[in-house]
Image: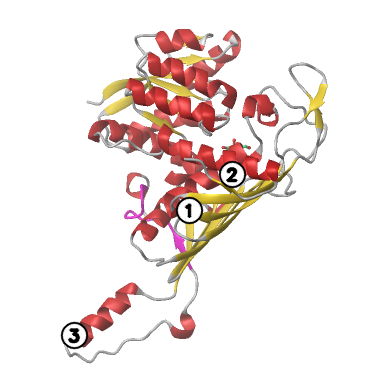
Amino acid sequence: MAKPLNIGMIGYGFMGRAHSNAYHKVNHFFDLAYRPVLKAACARSAEKIKAFADKWGYESTETDWRKLVERKDIDVIDICTPNDTHMEIALAAAANGKMILCEKPLARNGEEGRKMVESVAKAKVPNMVWYNYRRVPAVTLAKKIIDEGRLGRVFHYRAKFLQDWTISPDLPQGGTALWRLDVNAAGSGVTGDLLAHCIDTAMWLNGGIGEVCAMTETFVKERKHTLTGKVEKVGIDDACAFLCRFENGSLATFESTRYARGHKALYTFEINGEHASIFWDLHDLHRLQYFEYRDPMLQKFKEAAKAAGVTVEYQEAGTLRGWRSIHVSDGDHPYMGHWWVPGLQIGYEHSFVHQVADFIKGLETGTPAMPDFADAQKTQLVCDAVLKSAAERKWVPVGK
Ligand code: SOE
């Protein structure tokens, strides 16, 4: 029988729902030593958090997160609030010995992130950041392919995350969901919100980033602030593009915007290696596009045949070479053995279920699930370098 793992959720927005859904589902599909129990949900509005708690089955509610992090019956604090609150909550949760699951980005900047990393290290509490796209099975398969060395030397990494929901100048800044447009709450615009995902995946797949050269733009310079009612300067980056060099010598381009009319969440990445290339697209998330120039199995077969002095007939792909579109839905694909029968695909919400499962497995085995705070801090430092480079119009090394 799985032991209870009492969750204290702070926030009730999009991510509060995504995580709560994952807590509900995880033990139905994964055999785990712990079972998340939705113990308490917390937000400032008593009415709203009560409605959320009723809908998602939380046993109790709080309106002050300070009370929640002190509660003896809570094991894990899940931070699903705007970025400006991550640090304060995490520091208090760590001081109270709680495990912490924090929504991405870790913080508004590297300085806040550093304090968060120190606090969990000092308190020795398990911690993780919700960079969920690592756990889309096709993306996890890309990681496996790369770790097997199938790409050979990597030359290029290319990522973009395009949206179009802030084009209207009438959209206010601040308040529910729109805190993403308020620099004080968010820390940055698309850099921390969207490129952070691209950077996390990229460094997981292709290693560290050495230096960056970026440009940003704020297309709508003033917006009404929901909280003050006044028209105020917009401090976030609406769009950001940057070049970078990875530590393995590969060159990369990253682009993100909320002004790409027609695109809602077009997150794509492509990696070009000496022997193979990989392409993935969030809008077609269960597929991985793969091109292999040299088939390593065929290579091994040829070598073995030659060593044995055997003459065999085989055919190279020749003119039939081309990109494969792998439908990542078979039982031996990452995570897929836990779901339905081969060929039936899963979606966005499952990446969060996988992340909870991996976090719990980490508790069981003692090998923590990644990204933990320290790992997510690397993304924070790249974001800092990107924003510095854009402000100073020059190449900037990524801080350590
Ligand atoms: C912004 O629109 C957003 O919801 C991000 O905050 C998420 O992290 C991203 O996955 C989808 O887009």
Relative to residue 223, is residue 148 depicted above or below? below
Q: Amino acid at mark 1?
A: His
Label 3 to label 1: alpha-carbon separation: 40 Å
- Between marks 2 and 1 in the image, the one whose residue lies nearer the viewer: 2
The colour scheme applied to this rendered structure is secondary structure
**Which residue is located at x 61 percent, y 44 percent?**
386
Q: In the shown orientation, is residue 242 left or right of residue 222?
A: left
The answer to whether residue 266 is magenta is no
Q: In the shown orientation, is residue 345 left or right of residue 396?
A: left
Q: Which residue is disc 3 drawn over?
A: 307
Relative to residue 204, is residue 91 depicted above or below? above
Counting residues from the start of the chain, the first of labels 3 and 1 encountered is 1
Secondary structure mostly seen in the magenta stretch: loop
Kindly give the residue lying farthest to the left in the view shown. 308
Element class at badge 3: helix
**Quarter location, residue 222:** top right
Quadrant where the N terminus lies?
top left
**Quarter location, residue 25:** top left
Q: Amino acid at mark 2?
A: Leu
Mark 3: few/some/many CA within 10 Å (<14, 14-19, 20+): few
Instruction: Say the numbered circle drawn on residue 286.
Output: 1
Q: In the shown orientation, is residue 321 left or right of residue 365?
A: right
Relative to residue 71, is residue 114 depicted above or below? below
Looking at this view, is 308 or 5 the one in front? 308
Looking at this view, is 161 or 374 the one in front? 374
**Which residue is located at x 40 percent, y 67 percent?**
152
**Mark 3 and 1 residues: CB-CB less than 8 Å, in contact?**
no
Q: Which residues are magenta?
A: 324-335
> Residue 251: x and y, percent?
54, 60
Instruction: Say the numbered circle drawn on residue 195.
Output: 2
Label 2 to label 1: alpha-carbon separation: 21 Å
